[in-house]
């Protein structure tokens, strides 16, 4: 795997945004709306603010180890056995979460694009390019993310502009939705927060220096919060609550509402195309992240050997839930519980590293 | 260079990724243009399918031959079970993606249509651009009465009938999404009303106008009442009114224009108004530039202020209008008349329908911080006793001068 090129702020930020949008744009909006009502956009802003604070604190602790990567810091801080075990455990959690997301999205893609095709076919259709891209390495994935992301942001912006006549202020009132307690609970305690920030720590050895690492994280979290808040606002302003909680994939439903003249309608296939792009890049990043942790546990820097195994695990773990609904429910549970584990693990590793004054890179 | 060529080759190959494994030829499908749902026996429903006919199209070599109607009615427990039955004798695959219109009969609407609409929204078979309406009589009969004289195709006829914008038209687009979105149990709803007019309506109208002033406001017909010198004419006229669950009444033609003032823009159109001081009829061309201003002050009682500002011009200057005060008096009369008609419309929603048909609660909702507070306020039960103060201001543009009686009065 080539690791000669270090990523700058733009590439790393776009990769991070892409990874988070797969969750925030595709799966979470309806869950968050169900939880907090039409104030989902406020939840996203709060979530972003909380994540900024958390990332700034973790980044300050991580400053001396940017060149190592989280897996290596963990191995050095906790020792080969405990550090390696924690790396494997974290890797397993990332893969399981990725597998349920993968199953949910491959089912959705099948329903929308080829309802009569088998789910396994769609799963392989996604997983093969993911595996190939992951084999090509981190930089290749970052480059593809850099190409896809602008189109994703542009498409959301264009959708907002076209749907503007549908927006109703009354749809986002009462302004606090189900109430401030629900907003705060959803913002800090549910749906995995901005747990994707852990990937910045995992991949930090590919980033050109601490400043780039920190700026990528701060800009990325800010951008994700802004993009997803705009998307939620657009959704809530278009579809009033409680009708808004009935749609499984709001992005798709919004794309169906686009009817600007004879030509600008029937845009769902385009949305699905962009959607597939986001999913492919996000799953590649998940595979590489898990591989990076496993490689650190094994004391090697070459991730490519783990990619086929991880791809196979994602496929088979994704097939475990008996139905799409079961996969979705399991994904929700992993999201709600998992981020506490990630935060606790990150905190433990960084405190141990600081406490034991491990060798700096 | 080799890499670039390979990349180019791969990108070119990507065009083929769509594949053709699940393709279906267009002429292998049977396209449903409109779907009618009537009440059947023993809790069954009667589903009528109005199809495009292939006789002027692909299979017979083209040409602009007018299409015959192809209507099939089946009795089944659900719409989809009717489609399954349809499949037993139609050679082509049934396709709903080009459906333009869904018609519920009045008796179905009075039972409630929310479950049907939710089912249609949740399936991908229907486009969101389907018009939704209620038929005063049987939906099946409405389909049989459709005669697209000026249109070659029935689908064009439906598109034009429901999509046209005049001051008497009911609405430019009533998508089922609008109904689905606006019916979360927090207020009422309205849907366009269709029906089948009869020759006898002429006599009924003549009898009516022996006792009332024959101006536009008196001609407040619903779909089945439109006086027309023809039997079984398909008509789109007025609205079906729903409370949060089921249909509770109808609004007539002129009330539809008032609804347009409230909900959307009133497009250009002539209004004929009887003016008692001159004992004469005047035509004014009215249109709406500004959206209605609606303000709800929650409290005991709730107060709803509705201000509608309409622009217009005289289309005929009466010789009896000698000076400016005549015009001003007429403007004041228009203001008062339109305000009174709007008040009467609101009174009907409060006394007869007992439902916030025009979703004025959307404006009340803004005074609350949380959904729970809003729910606890129980707007639907408070709406009938709210004080509604409608005010219509008509501004007449007369020879480059803007006249506004209300503003001149201060």
Image (cartoon, coloured by chain):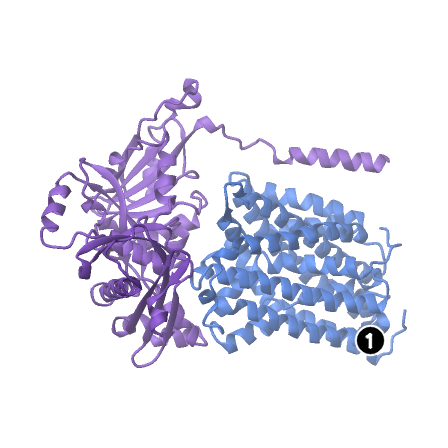
Chain colours: A blue, B purple
> In the drawing, does residue B34 fall left or right of residue A44?
left
Residue A264 place in picture, x, y as percent: 54, 44
**Residue B31 image offset from top left, x and y in percent:** 40, 33
Placement of A161 over or under B194, stated as above or below? below
Q: In the rendering, at what x and y percent does residue A29 appear? A: 54, 61
- Residue at 64% over, 43% down: A124
Residue shown at 37%/73% (left/top)?
B296
Q: Is residue A323 visible?
A: no
From the image, tell me which residue sits under label 1: A353
On the image, the x and y values in percent for residue A78 come to 80, 73
Local crowd size for mark 1, using a 10 Å CA cut-off: few (<14), some (14–19), many (≥20): many
From the viewer's perspective, is residue B235 above or below residue B382?
Answer: above
Answer with the quarter of the image where residue A327 lies: bottom right
Q: Is residue A309 left or right of residue B156?
A: right
Instruction: Tell me if B217 is positioned left or right of B365 in this view.
Output: left
Q: Nearer the viewer, residue B78 or B181?
A: B181
Residue at left offset 51%, top offset 77% = A180
Instruction: Write down the quadrant of residue B71 in the picture.
Output: top left
Of the 4 image quadrants, the one containing the N terminus of chain B is top right
Q: Locate the C terminus of chain B by quadrant.
A: bottom left
Seen in the picture, residue B40 relative to A194 is either above or below; the reply is above
The furthest residue to the front:
B322
Q: Is residue B326 above or below residue B20?
A: below
Q: Nearer the viewer, residue A340 or B258?
A: B258
Q: Chain of mark 1?
A: A
Give residue B190's quadrant in the image.
bottom left
| Residue B49 makes an appearance in the image | yes
């Amino acid at each position: 795997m080539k690791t000669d090129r270090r990523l700058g702020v733009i590439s790393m930020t776009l990769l991070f945004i892409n990874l988070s949008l797969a969750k925030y744009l595709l799966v979470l909006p309806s869950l968050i709306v169900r939880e907090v009502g039409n104030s989902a956009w406020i939840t996203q802003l709060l979530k972003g603010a909380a994540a900024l604070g958390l990332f700034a604190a973790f980044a300050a602790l991580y400053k001396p180890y940017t060149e190592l990567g989280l897996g290596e810091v963990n191995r050095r801080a906790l020792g080969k056995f405990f550090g390696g075990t924690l790396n494997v455990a974290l890797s397993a959690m990332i893969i399981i979460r990725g597998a349920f997301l993968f199953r949910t999205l491959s089912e959705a893609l099948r329903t929308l694009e080829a309802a009569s095709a088998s789910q396994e076919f769609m799963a392989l259709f996604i997983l093969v390019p993911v595996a190939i891209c992951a084999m090509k390495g981190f930089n290749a994935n970052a480059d593809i993310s850099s190409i896809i992301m602008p189109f994703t942001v542009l498409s959301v912006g264009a959708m907002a502009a076209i749907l503007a006549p549908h927006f109703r202020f009354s749809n986002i009132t009462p302004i606090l939705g189900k109430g401030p307690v629900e907003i705060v609970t959803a913002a800090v305690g549910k749906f995995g927060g901005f747990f994707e920030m852990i990937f910045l720590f995992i991949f930090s050895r590919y980033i050109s220096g601490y400043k780039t690492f920190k700026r990528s994280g701060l800009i990325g979290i800010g951008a994700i919060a802004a993009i997803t808040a705009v998307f939620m606002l657009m959704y809530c302003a278009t579809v009033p609550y409680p009708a808004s909680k009935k749609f499984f994939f709001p992005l798709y439903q919004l794309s169906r509402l686009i009817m600007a003249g004879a030509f600008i309608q029937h845009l769902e296939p385009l949305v699905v195309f962009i959607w597939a792009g986001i999913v492919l890049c996000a799953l590649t990043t998940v595979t590489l992240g898990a591989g990076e942790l496993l490689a650190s546990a094994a004391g090697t820097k070459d991730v490519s050997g783990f990619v086929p195994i991880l791809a196979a695990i994602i496929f088979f773990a994704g097939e475990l839930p008996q139905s799409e609904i079961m996969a979705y429910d399991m994904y929700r549970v992993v999201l709600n519980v998992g981020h506490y584990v990630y935060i606790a693990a990150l905190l433990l590793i960084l405190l141990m590293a600081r406490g034991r004054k491990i060798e700096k890179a | 260079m080799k890499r670039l060529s390979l990349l180019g080759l791969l990108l070119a190959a990507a065009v083929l990724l769509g594949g053709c494994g699940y393709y279906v030829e267009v002429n292998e499908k049977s396209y449903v243009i409109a779907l009618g749902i009537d009440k059947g026996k023993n809790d069954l429903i009667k589903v009528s399918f109005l199809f495009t006919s292939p006789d002027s199209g692909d299979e017979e070599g083209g040409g602009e031959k007018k299409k015959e109607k192809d209507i099939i009615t089946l009795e089944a427990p659900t719409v989809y079970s009717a489609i399954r039955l349809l499949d037993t004798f139609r050679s082509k695959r049934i396709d709903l993606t080009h459906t333009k219109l869904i018609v519920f009969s009045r008796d179905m609407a009075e039972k409630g249509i929310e479950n049907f609409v939710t089912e249609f929204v949740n399936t991908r078979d229907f486009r969101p651009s389907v018009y939704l309406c209620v038929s005063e009589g049987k939906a099946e009969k409405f389909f049989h009465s459709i005669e697209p004289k000026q249109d070659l195709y029935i689908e064009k006829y439906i598109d034009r009938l429901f999509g046209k914008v005049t001051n008497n038209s009911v609405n430019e687009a009533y998508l089922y999404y609008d109904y689905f979105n606006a019916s979360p149990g927090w207020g009422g709803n309205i849907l366009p009303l269709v029906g089948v007019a009869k020759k006898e309506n002429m006599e009924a109208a003549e009898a009516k106008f022996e006792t009332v002033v024959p101006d536009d406001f008196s001609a407040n017909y619903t779909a089945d009442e439109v006086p027309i010198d023809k039997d079984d004419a398909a008509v789109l006229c007025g609205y079906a009114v729903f409370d949060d669950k089921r249909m509770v009444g109808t609004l007539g033609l002129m009330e539809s224009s008032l609804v347009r003032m409230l909900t959307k823009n009133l497009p250009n159109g002539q209004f004929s108004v009887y003016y008692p001081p001159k004992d004469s009829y005047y035509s004014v061309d009215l249109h709406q530039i500004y959206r209605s201003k609606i303000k709800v002050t929650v409290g005991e009682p709730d107060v709803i202020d509705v201000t509608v500002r309409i622009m217009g011009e005289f289309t005929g200057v009466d010789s009896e209008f000698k000076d400016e005060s005549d015009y001003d008096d007429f403007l004041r009369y228009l203001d008062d008349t339109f305000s009174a008609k709007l008040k009467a419309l609101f009174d009907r929603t409060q006394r007869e329908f007992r439902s916030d048909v025009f979703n004025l609660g959307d404006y009340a909702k803004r005074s609350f911080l949380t959904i729970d507070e809003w729910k606890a306020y129980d707007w639907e039960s408070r709406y009938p006793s709210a004080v509604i103060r409608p005010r219509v201001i008509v501004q007449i543009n007369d020879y480059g001068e803007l006249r506004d009686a209300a503003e001149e009065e201060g």
